[in-house]
Image: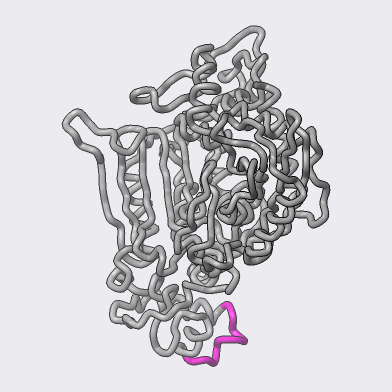
Amino acid sequence: MIIADTIAFQYSAYITINSSEPGGKIMEEQEIRNLLESVRARKTELSTFEAKSAHVDCPKKIYDTLSSFSNQDEGGVIMFGVDENQDFAVTGVYDAADIQKKIFGKCREMEPEIRPKMSVAAIEGKQVVAAEIPGVEYTDRPVFYRPAGINNGSYIRIGDADEHMTAYEVYKYQAYRKGLKEDQRLVEDGWELVDSALLHKYLNTLKNRRVNTFEHLADSEILRLQKVEKEGYPTLAGLLVFSKYPQSAFPGLGITAVAVPGTERGDAFADGTRFTDNERIEGSLPEMLEEAMRFVKKNIKYSTVIDDMGNRVDKWQYPLRAVREALLNALIHRDYSRHTEGTPIQLIIYQDRMEIINSGGIYGGFPVKRLGKDSPESRNSTLIKILEFLDISENRYSGVPTMRKEMAKAGLPQPEFEDNGKQFKTILRNIPELTDKQIRINISGLNQKEREAVQYCSVPRTRSEIASQLKLNYNYAANKIIKPLVDRGILISAGKKGRTVMLKAAESVHSQTASQ
């Protein structure tokens, strides 16, 4: 099992590095064998692996997998001559040369066309064909089956299954490719509730900072150049900032804020109460930001401490500056398209964490792991620019670094970011970060996946979160990784009904730290 886990990890790195390079090296026979063994060990297909028997002929329907693999960064491998329904037994292909020809033909039916790398191996005395499908550039997605059209022929990989892309998922790629700016679209509901004082402040700031550009221009001309107005009507960005009640035109563009008595949605007090507080926050974007901060301060704990200078200081359960940055990021980076305008931002305060969820993944497929290190493109550049001149947002991509710095100063775990393409979630946890001394446990003898699970559980995690982090099937992760660690006392159950698994704070004279 240890070998299989290691192989899977190495193969993941291999396909990421090589699959996008035209003419790059193809898989060697031993690599194909190793990949098959890792799949057999898990007893399930992977997000990057699909088995097709092809004992009699080339499968008729593979365009769904061709599409889904092409539409993910890591691509994937389709292995012909292996039957999933027989525990991934090697059945062999009917004719290695002919099946390769037919696969290339099916790849030419995709839009844009796919160029797979083909490998042939002899396993258990039978021929197996491996087709490596590279992930295409984000700007070329979605890859779809041409005869079915873009809406019916576009697929996405979810676990080990190929699912039709939703209309929004297709739109997301098209919007990026076409450079659509939803925050600049016209809103014909007008300026009936305009915040004149804030608009006046904005215009004066522009004139003072851009004297040579705006000093002698009429206010209407400045607003037009700054994309606040078009043809006498506000743009969506202008409405969100300068209208006292944008929800008259867009009822869904608000924030739903709840405080939950437990650590999961659905947890309740003995009398059945599910929320300790519940509000719908509306108004302009600056007003929603301040109202959301008021809600947070009302529903989190704080204590008064004496600092090094002898001053009394309020210490909040979460650093307020980190919370503000998380809320601001959700407000200015969410997707404001017609597909999502009915979906409010969610602010959920649990006992052990705070979650802030907004519609739309990171713009342009920017990887989560690069947040705070590189600068992603802006989905709502007009909105961000307006807020910059109002000194509400810095527009220097400092939000994530600020969150990380503030959480570290407070002795709390680093913020977590999750992007499933449809929603972006920021998680702030209030359980103090464990020190090396506190998390010293005996991890000798653990395989790679077990070590990853232990390190990931330095703060409470659900079983489904662990499975997702390890990129494993839920049942496999629960029975083969989590349960043995719990049985050994390395992971312990914490939280209601044991749904949250956390690292046991145990010490051992002969231990190693989880950071190893």
Left/right of residue 437 with respect to residue 288 in the rendered view? right
Q: Residue at x 75, y 46 (%)?
A: 96
Task: Identify which residue is drawn at 56% across, 53% down.
Answer: 61
Judged left or right of residue 22, residue 9 is left
Q: Residue 325: give x, y in percent of width and height.
A: 49, 53
Q: Quadrant of the N terminus?
A: top right
Above or below, comparing residue 479 to residue 159 in the picture: above
Residue furthest toward the top? 509
Is residue 387 visible to us here? yes
* Residue segment shown in magenta: 209-218
Q: Is residue 23 left or right of residue 474?
A: right
What scheme was used to colour the molecule?
one colour
Residue 399 magenta: no
In the depicted structure, whether residue 325 falls above or below residue 392 = above
* Residue in view at x 67 percent, y 14 percent: 444
Measured along the vertical axis of the image, is residue 230 above or below residue 202?
below
Quarter holding the C terminus? top right
Question: Which of the 4 image quarters holds residue 375?
Answer: bottom right
Q: Nearer the viewer, residue 207 or 18?
A: 18
Residue drawn 38% across the image and 55% down it = 345
- Where's residue 330, x and y in %? 46, 56
Left/right of residue 376 with respect to residue 328 in the rendered view:
right
Judge by depth and name the residue closer to the eye, 466 or 146: 146
Q: Is residue 211 magenta?
A: yes
Instruction: Tell which of 454 and 459 is nearer to you.
Output: 454
Q: Where does residue 364 sit, x and y in percent of width and height?
A: 59, 61
**Which x, y percent locates residue 83?**
60, 36
Q: Can residue 372 be seen?
A: no
